[in-house]
Image (tube, rainbow, N blue to C red):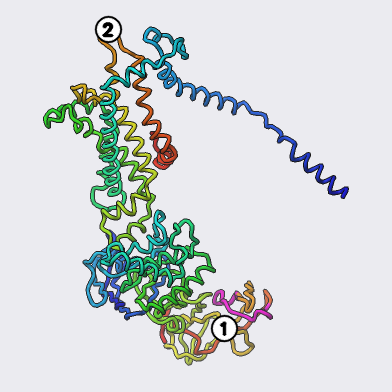
Amino acid sequence: MAVVEEIRASSEALLSAKAPRKPANMGQIIRWLLLFGGGILMVMPIAYMISTSLKWPHEVYNVNLIPVEPTIENYTFVLEDGRFYGWFINSIIIATITTICNLLFDSLVGYTLCKFRFPGRYIIFIAILSTLMIPTEMLVIPWYLMSQQFGWLDTYWGIMFPGLMTAFGTFLMKQFFETVPDDFIEAARIDGLNELQIWWTVAMPLVKPALAALAIFVFLGNWTAFIWPLIVTNSVEMYTLPVGLSGFGDEADVAWELIMTGAAISTIPTLIVFLIFQRFIIRGVVMAGLKG
Amino acid sequence: MATLSLRQLTKTYEKTEVLHGIDLSIEDGEFVVFVGPSGCGKSTTLRLIAGLEEATSGDIEIAGRVVNNLEPKERDIAMVFQNYAIYPHMTVRKNIGFGLRTAKMSRADKEARIDEVAAILDMTELLSRKPSQLSGGQRQRVAIGRAMVRDPAVFLFDEPLSNLDAQLRTQMRLEIKKLHQRVGNTIVFVTHDQVEAMTMADRIVIMKDGHIQQVGTPDEVYHAPANTFVAQFIGAPSMNMLQGVGAEGGISLPSGIQFRGPLAPNGVPLVLGVRPDDLHLDDGEPLVEGQVAVREPLGHETLIYVTTQGGEIIAKADGRRPPDVGETVRLRARPDRVHIFDAATGQAIR
């Protein structure tokens, strides 16, 4: 019995003893500081956006983060302004349709380039990729002239058409389809499915993470798009949220507190989408070997 | 069920011909195994039959109709792939039923057919599981089930057991053989494992470099190999090959030993082949004589590697009393167990 008691005592002592703490080395401290600094840098604009949205107009140009007299008056004003809802709906419609189109077209082209052997396949792929090197600003004038010719100015179609398919999305989807074994495709072919059915039934479910990542990229891109919607729209009713928000204020002054309020409200849908799909977006970025 | 014929089948990739005029007839309900080393063209032949590749020339005939220009789905075949190709996002039931998607059957009939196949493969309990919840053997059975469900004229198996461990492979081998006996469909099975070929096939097609080397029953290819390649490819350990020259009443070996027995053309360079199983330790007139270099005990028998004047020879000795390493042994073979090949062409002489 004495032996048992002795063992129990020593084992309890061992269990209750705290694990020796490893002293943090200088490298780790520097890494933490850098990460902390980076985190602060990322969060500050959002913090200022929320802070400004809670300030009175006279306090907007104060750099203090905590408002002296916090108010929700700006939120009341923006939400009571009927135009805001119209812009919000416009943005939702445009971002959603563009996202769906990208999911369909990018994955179709990516799948074709990945799984079919045909002459010129590589050249087509390079041609698509090369469009990534052309800045949007360079394309705006041709797009505008085209929209004018076709009568697309100030329409949903006019806002959406440049982004219905993207080179980035095509590349992302092609890379993901590379991970789908050819045996799956061939097995389905033997089982009697046509190529479109194989793409939809077999290949697409296997690249869901890529689809989720692409959906987030495209949705966010279109939700925040500013230059093209600003150029192609004329009437206030056709504005998207970023374009509409930029117009708050009057000729004498810009109403930053209202713009920041609208921006704060407009981040909510994107935040929700991101929180739901963030594990997919991370996997998508890792597998495509690309930065978002 | 159906016959399958290949006539002068060739396949060229860019400028390289990988199949050089394959001719083969497979009977209705026959289990034929294509075997050969990597790159011999066996999988290409299977893919041509399946319609996954287009033949450069020649005809493929299934059940009496040429299918060269038909899509895979129109050929009435089903294929089991090396890595199963079962869809990870579908349950076992959906995977098995996948082949029936385009079938003109009522939903109830489809469900009944899936249940029937699952029962045959002893998978009824697993129907609601996803592939990730299955073992390797179970996944293989799902793949077979998906092929079976359509009741095709010809089953094609592309090295389906190569991803399984040794024990499971033996078990699945037996299951596939039983399945064939039960359903009786024509089966074309591709493997690089000669044991699989020997144990499962009604007939074996041995291929090398895009040519068929021999077609025959397991007994035929083992006991009467058509050439030195078949002789060495089939059987483990491989057949021993000794260089010799045809002499009066037998073969003269470099060691000076005159092997009497098989009639061989006088003065012609020959290769004498003898399987390790057919060499026995014997004090009588030997075929070869040499020193034991290595022993490999297998329990009931011991493989001995004997260094002779004509090169290294493998023989089997009694597992209880094998000769010691370094010991000089005399190995004898019955004349009717010795194979003679033309040294120039490698073709069997008798």
Which circle marks residue B279 in the picture?
1
Q: Which of A132 and B323 is in front in this view?
A: A132
Q: Is residue B269 visible?
A: no
Query: Is A119 on the left or on the right of B246, as rendered?
Result: left
Mark 2 on the same chain as mark 1: no
Q: Dividing the picture into quarters, in which one does residue A292 lie?
A: top left
Q: In which quarter of the image is residue A15?
A: top right
Q: In this view, does B109 lie to the left or right of B266?
A: left
Crowd class of label 2 (few under 14; some 14 to 19; many from 20; radius 10 Å): few
Q: Name the amino acid, label 1.
A: Leu
In depth, the one of A277 and A282 nearer the eye is A277
Q: Residue A252 carries which label?
A: 2
Whether residue B30 appears in magenta in the rendering, the answer is no
Residue type, label 2: Ala
Horizontally, is B282 left or right of B73 in the view? right
Give the SS element for disc 2.
loop
- Residue at 41 percent across and 78 percent down: it is B182
| Residues rendered magenta in the picture | B305-323
Alpha carbon distance from label 2 to label 1: 108 Å
